[in-house]
Amino acid sequence: FVTMSWMIATKAARGADGTDDRPKDVVAAAIVDDGRVLLAQRAHPAELAGKWELPGGRVESGETHAQALSREIREELGAEIEVGARIGAQVMLPNRLVLHAYRARLRSGTPAALEHLDVQWFSADELRLLDLDDVVPADRDWIPELCAILDDA
Ligand code: CDP
């Protein structure tokens, strides 16, 4: 039975063409500094271009969420972060991606838009004024909690 279960599980995890269709984690950072949170404006794909997101990316195999997030922020923003507590609820994305967000603090460097159109620090009041149409859909539900975090900061 154990062998059968394993075979079924293995089969379920591999598509007919050998591709892996297990859920994949994506991590995003709420970098908070001086009472503001950093949002990054996506450059692609076309339907998300110009919309603000918490910066991050896919977790590679063998990486912890914190390692993946530190790597993504180094690659995308040229800054070093310390990853803190999880925030918000996880969000299911298309293509079996699952999005998770974490608080983070800057360790060194100044975040720059190396792969985004722009990066900008938002206060709680500025977040409240942000048009949700200008936010990546998956990140919209996190805005109230981000405001609360900044109100406490
Ligand atoms: O660069 P990489 O492919 O690792 O990641 P990405 O393209 O930035 O993100 C992977 C997926 O997660 C894309 O579908 C993004 O739209 C989504 N994502 C999101 O919805 N919200 C974020 N804060 C970050 C990523």
Image (cartoon, rainbow, N blue to C red):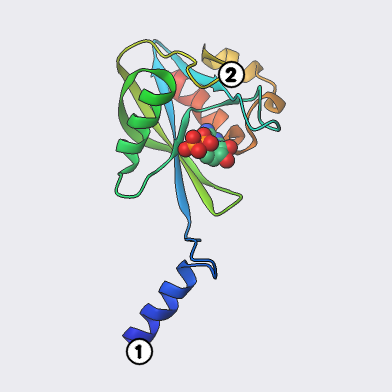
**Looking at the image, is 35 positioned above or below residue 88?**
above
Q: Which residue is at 50% across, 48% downward?
A: 98
- Snapshot quadrant of residue 28: top left
Q: Which residue is at 57% across, 34% downward?
A: 139
Residue 153 visible, this orientation? no
Residue 137 in the figure: left or right of residue 76: right
**Looking at the image, is 113 positioned above or below residue 11?**
above
What quarter of the picture does the C terminus occupy? top left
Q: Three-letter amino acid code at disc 2? A: Leu
Q: Secondary structure at mark 1?
A: loop
Residue 69 in the figure: left or right of residue 90: left
**CB contact under 8 Å: marks 1 and 2:** no
Front position in the image: 129 or 95: 95
Residue 48 visible, this orientation? yes
Q: Residue furthest front?
A: 17
Q: x%, y% of residue 69?
A: 37, 33
Q: Residue furthest bottom?
A: 1
- Snapshot quadrant of residue 68: top left
What quarter of the picture does the N terminus occupy? bottom left
Q: x%, y% of residue 88?
A: 48, 39
Q: Which residue is at 36% across, 26% downward?
A: 104
Q: x%, y% of residue 36?
A: 46, 14
Front position in the image: 94 or 142: 94
The residue where tag 1 is placed is 1
For label 1, the crowd category at 10 Å Cα-Cα, with few meaning under 14, some 14 to 19 and many 20 or more, is few
Between circles 1 and 2, the one closer to the viewer is 1
The number of numbered discs placed on residues in the rendered structure image is 2
Q: x%, y% of residue 138?
A: 60, 38
Q: Which mark is residue 127?
A: 2
Q: Three-letter amino acid code at disc 1? A: Phe
Q: Secondary structure at mark 2?
A: helix
